[in-house]
Amino acid sequence: MLPSQNPEHPANDVPAGGALDDLIARARRLRDDLNAARLGESADGAEHGIRHAVWALAAHRLEDVGEQLDQLRSIRAPDGRARLGMRIGSAEWNLLTDGAVWSEELFSIFGRPVQEGPLTLDQLPSFLPPEDQPKLTAAVTGCLVDGRPMDCEFRITRADGSQRTVQMAGEPVLDDRGGTVAMWAMIRDVSEVRRSSVAPGGGGEQDGDELRAQHGLARAGHGLAIGLEDSALAPWLGSPEPGRADGLPGSLELAARYLPARPGAPMSGKWYDVLELPDGACLLSVGDLSGRGPAAAAGAATTLGAIRGIGLTGSEPGGLLGHLNELLDRGVHPVLAGALCCRYEPEGRLLRWAQAGHPAPLLCRNGTGWALPRPAGPLLGAVTGVAYEQRADRLEPGDVLVLHTDGLFSDIPPGGRSGHGGDGRLIELAPRLGAASSALEALRVLVDACGERGREDDACVLVARVRG
């Protein structure tokens, strides 16, 4: 997940009143249609194990989407605007000057007067209990030295003696040569959430059962990702039905892969997905939910269900991410997520896309490659009431587009180029990717270069090739 290039954003135009009610009604109709289709397929005896898991996952997630949209309606103020909460703050630490910049919200979370100034990275551990300090130190070191995104949870002790539990998600800020010059982070106060999860009568056992059920579905999805490694479709889809215009000029040939971390590493909340829309367009998405383990995997499946549900309403990528941001920010369990969402229209070969703190797509054309300029967009769940800018690019026959999460390469070498401008090692593969005879062959080039075994981090990659 990457910080936004432009922190200033206009207010997000989240639908109020009738528009939001219509979105809820559409989500519920979609759920009913899906259930009817699932029953029809079952009656015909055509359902098997993999398709059953996908049907169950989609139905479960659409149910969540309807409930979350209903929750979004219930939390709106009388004037139709979302109520703002002060649960998250941002910070940037400059390694060249040892300076720090904090938002007002972060001072409030730490209970620190603004006039005392922000804490430097050297001072920050002293506000943690001794047993939590190694966790923060390891996360910051991995971010600054290895160039890895950080995501950790720890307690802080405020000046009045009270303790708060916070979640910190950060990214290295790189210069043009790939050197780390600063660290950018968002810190969310999750104290109330953590207390409610262990309070008597707080539904801990029930929540645990639901989480285990969600984990089973998420594992099924990732199992499909691994088992269908030679498929031309994302793991959440079945095989293409006969008669579809998959081979027409201008359409996309697709291949994708989930690259797991080394054995024993906890599963992350990364995903990739492809969804054919009713109007003939195609919705592509990749993303990374903060955290690791069963909760992150289940959250990624829920987020993916929301993307599909909102996408089927006809929402453009920028608006889709805006709605998704509100859902994640207002959920019972606050999370942060980076995401890239693209809508491709075969007629005209038009790609419209938006991003939320995520690496830009790599475009390979005529033997060269470059990362598309990123439209502004903060991490999902980070800031309420923002708009996600959208970009449009015209693709050409033979173009190869690579969508990927963080962690595609297991390390960032000293002096290596990464960040907003794209990873230099990925860009160097552009001639081979563009020369590949199929999307699957291009995917194999990527997997061979990135490594599939002994990886430090898992990753998702989706390759789209424009048919001529």
Image: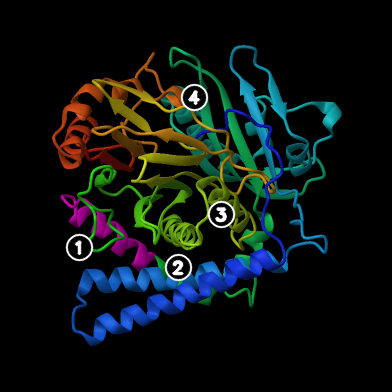
> 10 Å neighbourhood of mark 4: few (<14), some, or many (≥20)?
many
Q: Is residue 387 above or below residue 200?
A: above
> Disc 4 residue type?
Leu
Q: CA distance from mark 1 to mark 4?
A: 51 Å
Q: Nearer the viewer, mark 2 or mark 4?
A: 2
Numbered disc 3: secondary structure: helix
The stretch of residues the image draws in magenta is 215-232
Residue 324 bears which disc, if any?
Answer: 3
**Looking at the rendering, which quadrant does residue 4 occupy?**
top right
Residue nearer the viewer, 47 or 261: 47
Q: Earlier in the sequence, mark 1 or mark 3?
A: 1
Q: CA distance from mark 3 to mark 4?
A: 30 Å
Q: Is residue 98 left or right of residue 248?
A: right
| Residue 99 x %, y % | 68, 18
Residue 243 bears which disc, if any?
Answer: 1
Tally the marks.
4
Q: CA distance from mark 1 to mark 3?
A: 33 Å
Q: Is residue 74 left or right of residue 263?
A: right
> Disc 3 residue type?
Leu
> 10 Å neighbourhood of mark 1: few (<14), some, or many (≥20)?
few
Q: Is residue 275 left or right of residue 356?
A: left
Numbered disc 4: secondary structure: helix
Residue 61 bears which disc, if any?
Answer: 2
Q: Nearer the viewer, mark 1 or mark 3?
A: 1
> Disc 2 residue type?
Arg
